[in-house]
């Protein structure tokens, strides 16, 4: 308990406890009394603390000491909800929170998350999972707490580890033309066209999932990407906009795919004019898990590396297009990539140029196949 002996000042007041220690208090701008969060050994120390508070008030830097007493989990979930994120991004953030962040920070208030606690959490996560996931989780925590700084709930962001949010992904493998053909054959007739559009488009998986019959142009030999249907972690597909405005594009395909497109429309696409181009054996939109099992088996039969993902066909397409004479801006247009800087660089790649690239790809693939057949025939002639 404090004794009856108080000391009046022009700002605030200090009081001595019976223990001999000192406390300080002041009236905040909202009219409520605020008391020092700790006691002081001397009266001078208590008055120094009050002087610092008074200076903060005069500079407009004062912050309610109770403002940061907000549970991190509550604030983080609301942060995701208020961002207006794409469904896949929101799903990823909530998954990162659930698995990697909330188990540590969930019960703490925002002002209880300190730099040492952030360092300890990151070290524990690195020991438990991959560095790429940890980098994503760290960036998310940092972004959430940066908003808390803007909201004046905490004074400074405790995420201060240099480079902790950077990912250093290894260079992805590239398939050869023979391997693309082999994996297309191994996937079977229903899915071979998807392999080719992923490789020679190159289109994203979520764009392939939303291609429809009316998006196919047999005369130009290409497909129109209008929407995307990414699959969330709960297995549901959400139809929405492409990753960026640049994602809405017409992809001119190599000429050899004209027959593949026609065959697929005749045999496998939904029959309605707006029917999906790619559906499973039961006529339903394909699931990532089911398709993934088919891909894993086909990858083995085609002799692709164990770490070669379906998405790596897109990287293969970039590389083959470049080798076929495409400039950087051409490949960006084909791939539907965009940024403020890219918008200035890549906007001049028109349809005629895209046709030239597709024709070059067609010639490259056809020449390779012809050479392979001739080599195979020569081997048969020379076989005694």
Image (cartoon, helix red, strand yellow):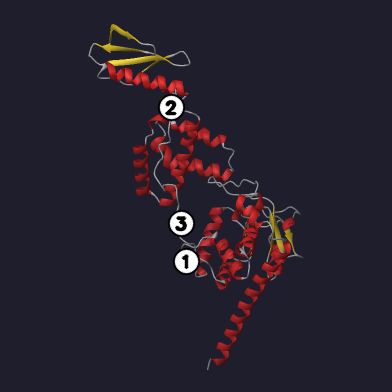
Q: Residue at x 48, y 28 (%)?
A: 152
Q: Tell me if label 3 and label 1 are in contact, CB under 8 Å.
A: no
Numbered tag placed on residue 305 in the rendering: 1
Could you tell whether 80 is left or right of 207 in the image? left
Q: Secondary structure at mark 3?
A: loop
Q: Nearer the viewer, residue 94 or 336?
A: 336
Q: Nearer the viewer, residue 71 or 5?
A: 5
In depth, the one of 103 and 282 nearer the eye is 103
Q: Secondary structure at mark 1?
A: loop
Residue 116 position by quadrant:
top left
Q: Which residue is label 3 attached to?
A: 169
Q: Describe the element under mark 2 as helix, strand or loop.
A: loop
> Nearest the camera: 44 or 339?
44
Q: On screen, 355 above or below 123?
A: below
Q: CA distance from mark 3 to mark 1?
A: 17 Å
Q: Is residue 302 visible?
A: yes
* Extreme-left residue of the structure: 19
How crowded is the residue under tag 3: few (<14 C-alpha within 10 Å), some, or many (20+)?
few
Which quadrant of the structure image shows residue 192? bottom right
Dot 3 or dot 1: first in sequence order is 3
Task: Count numbered badges in the picture.
Answer: 3
Residue 5 % position (x, y): 28, 6
Identify the residue at image location x=37%, y=44%.
Answer: 122
- Which residue is tagged 2? 68
């Amino acid at each position: 308990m404090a004794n009856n002996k108080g000391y009046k000042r022009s700002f605030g007041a200090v009081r001595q406890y019976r223990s001999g220690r000192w406390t300080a208090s002041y009236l905040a701008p909202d009219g409520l009394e605020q008391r020092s969060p700790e006691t002081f050994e001397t009266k001078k120390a208590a008055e120094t603390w009050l002087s610092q508070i008074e200076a903060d008030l005069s500079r407009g830097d004062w912050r309610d000491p109770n403002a940061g007493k907000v549970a991190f989990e509550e604030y983080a979930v609301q942060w995701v909800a208020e961002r207006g994120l794409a469904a896949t991004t929101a799903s990823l953030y909530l998954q990162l929170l659930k698995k990697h962040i909330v188990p540590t920070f969930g019960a703490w208030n925002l002002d209880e998350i300190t730099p040492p606690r952030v360092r300890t959490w990151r070290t524990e996560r690195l020991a438990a999972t991959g560095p790429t996931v940890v980098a994503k989780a760290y960036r998310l925590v940092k972004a959430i707490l940066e908003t808390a700084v803007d909201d004046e709930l905490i004074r400074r962001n405790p995420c201060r580890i240099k480079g902790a949010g950077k990912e250093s992904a290894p260079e992805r493998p590239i398939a050869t033309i023979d391997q693309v053909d082999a994996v297309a054959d191994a996937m079977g007739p229903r899915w071979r066209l998807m392999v080719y559009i992923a490789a020679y488009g190159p289109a994203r998986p979520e764009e392939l999932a939303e291609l429809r019959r009316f998006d196919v142009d047999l005369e130009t030999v290409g497909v129109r990407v209008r929407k995307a249907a990414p699959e969330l972690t709960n297995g549901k597909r959400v139809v929405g906009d492409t990753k960026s405005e640049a994602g809405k594009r017409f992809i001119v395909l190599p000429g050899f795919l004209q027959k593949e497109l026609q065959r697929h429309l005749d045999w496998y696409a939904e029959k309605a004019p707006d029917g999906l181009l790619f559906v499973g054996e039961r006529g339903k939109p394909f699931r990532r898990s089911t398709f993934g099992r088919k891909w894993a088996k086909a990858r083995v039969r085609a002799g692709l590396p164990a770490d070669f993902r379906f998405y790596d066909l897109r990287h293969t397409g970039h590389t083959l297009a470049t080798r076929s004479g495409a400039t950087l801006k051409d490949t960006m247009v084909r791939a539907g990539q965009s940024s403020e800087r890219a918008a200035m660089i890549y906007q001049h790649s028109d349809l005629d140029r895209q046709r030239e690239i597709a024709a070059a790809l067609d010639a490259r693939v056809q020449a390779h196949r012809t050479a392979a057949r001739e080599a195979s025939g020569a081997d048969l002639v020379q076989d005694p």
